[in-house]
Image (cartoon, grey):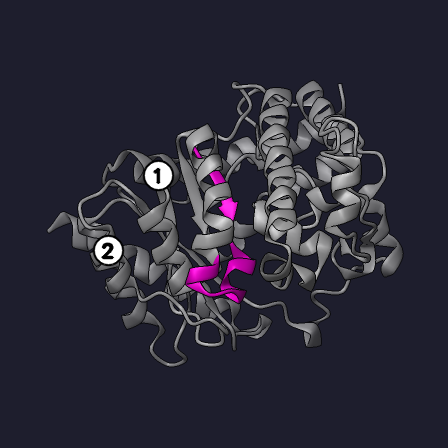
Amino acid sequence: MNQPVDDALTELASALKANPACDGFAADLAAQEGRPRPHPMFHLNRQADPNAGEGIPKGGQKERRTQLEAYTPERLAVELCGLLAPLKLHNPIRPLLGLGVGPGTATASFGCRLDPDANFCPSNHISVAELLATGCPDPAASGIMPSIREKIEVIKAHTPSWVKISMPDLQGPFNIIHMVVGNDVFILPQEEPETFRQGMTVFTDFFLAAHRMVSEWIGPERLDPYLARRYTVAECSTNMVSPEFYREHILAHDRRVAENWGRIAIHTCSGPHVFFNTLRHLPHVIDTEAGRIPPATSGWTDVDVALAEIGARPIILRIGSELPEGDEESFIRRDLDRLATNPRLQLGYVGMYWKKKDEDKIREMHLKLNEYYRERIEK
């Protein structure tokens, strides 16, 4: 028995029961199965407000460094309580605990040092030649993978099966090679295409093996019921190359992932050419992205264009948009109108200009838009 964990579980269970309109798993499964849902369950967020002391660890740099220390029931209790935070703005919640340290998770297995002062991104690079000399790292024993297994064991030992465990952020073959090797990945395919191909093969081997292994560690009873049915390939770095580069040097490795798993989701990082290349040239895509992101260097994928491309295929479209200031409600209503007739949508928004002082306004807007959707589907 661990009282802090038990107390946190009781609070989480009560919150889920008391807030059916914020049951994120219900929205996930409805979208996946193409079923209408009585509540829109969208995310409406703001950026961290440094002027209000947000985004700064309370314990300074030392607190960030503890993220790679041993996982304990005390840390588990804190994470369980943290799952309730989205309710503050009426956003969906899920009894789902994460693993790893974000995008840098897999890079440590290849010998990269993770910098706790830079969100655990790799602080050094390793050449493809060095990687080929050593081969694919052991996905069970390399980097922070043993810590991930330890965390899974602690979670399973102290929580019931209704608390699920999400896969760590393993990114995708090209994202990982870019983080590990650095910007040489943009030159090597032109100068040494066979070396690059062999390097991408090693990263794909690791990506597949690590995903399969961690899935087994978690076990079918504990896997996120939504994510367990598909695997995510993050394509952030693909926005930095041309469509032709993608098709010539990356596509074959992504295709191998898709054919191996049978169901994949694509994180396009908003890029239109990534959206079209992956949707048109990869098999088994069941989940992709679109939405308004004005600052995106490679542009963003318009929702109407994305829906036209998807057509009648049973593909989930995750809409993630930065809101236009002053036109937030009408902008979101357009997507809620779409959701009322297309249940395979998932919606998320951020007001980049909103601050902590705007939270009452955000809550009021969220409730108002929830009611708009309910009235819309009842007509």
Q: Which residue is drawn at 28% across and 59% down?
A: 306
Q: Does the magenta stretch include residue 242?
A: yes
Q: In this view, does 238 lie to the left or right of 366?
A: right
Please state which of residues 248 and 263 is positioned toward the viewer in this rendering. Answer: 248
Relative image position of residue 197 (x, y in whole percent): 59, 46
Query: Under tag 1, what secondary structure?
Result: loop
Q: Is residue 204 left or right of residue 226?
A: right
Q: Is residue 215 above or below residue 29?
A: above
**Is residue 348 something that shows in the picture?**
no
Q: In this view, does 265 lie to the left or right of 379?
A: right
Q: Tell me the quarter of the picture where residue 183 sits.
A: bottom right
Mark 1 highlights which residue? Answer: 283
Q: Residue at x 63, y 24 (%)?
A: 213
Q: Which residue is drawn at 69% across and 61% down?
A: 184
Relative image position of residue 264 (x, y in whole percent): 42, 38
Extent of the magenta region: 230-245
Q: Which mark is residue 309?
A: 2
Look at label 1 and name its amino acid: Pro
Q: Residue at x 37, y 55 (%)?
A: 277
Q: Which mark is residue 171?
A: none
Query: Under tag 2, what secondary structure?
Result: helix
Mark 1 closeness class: few <14, some 14–19, many ≥20 residues within 10 Å: some
Whether label 2 touches label 1, CB < 8 Å: no
Q: In this view, does 261 lie to the left or right of 371?
A: right
Mark 2 closeness class: few <14, some 14–19, many ≥20 residues within 10 Å: some
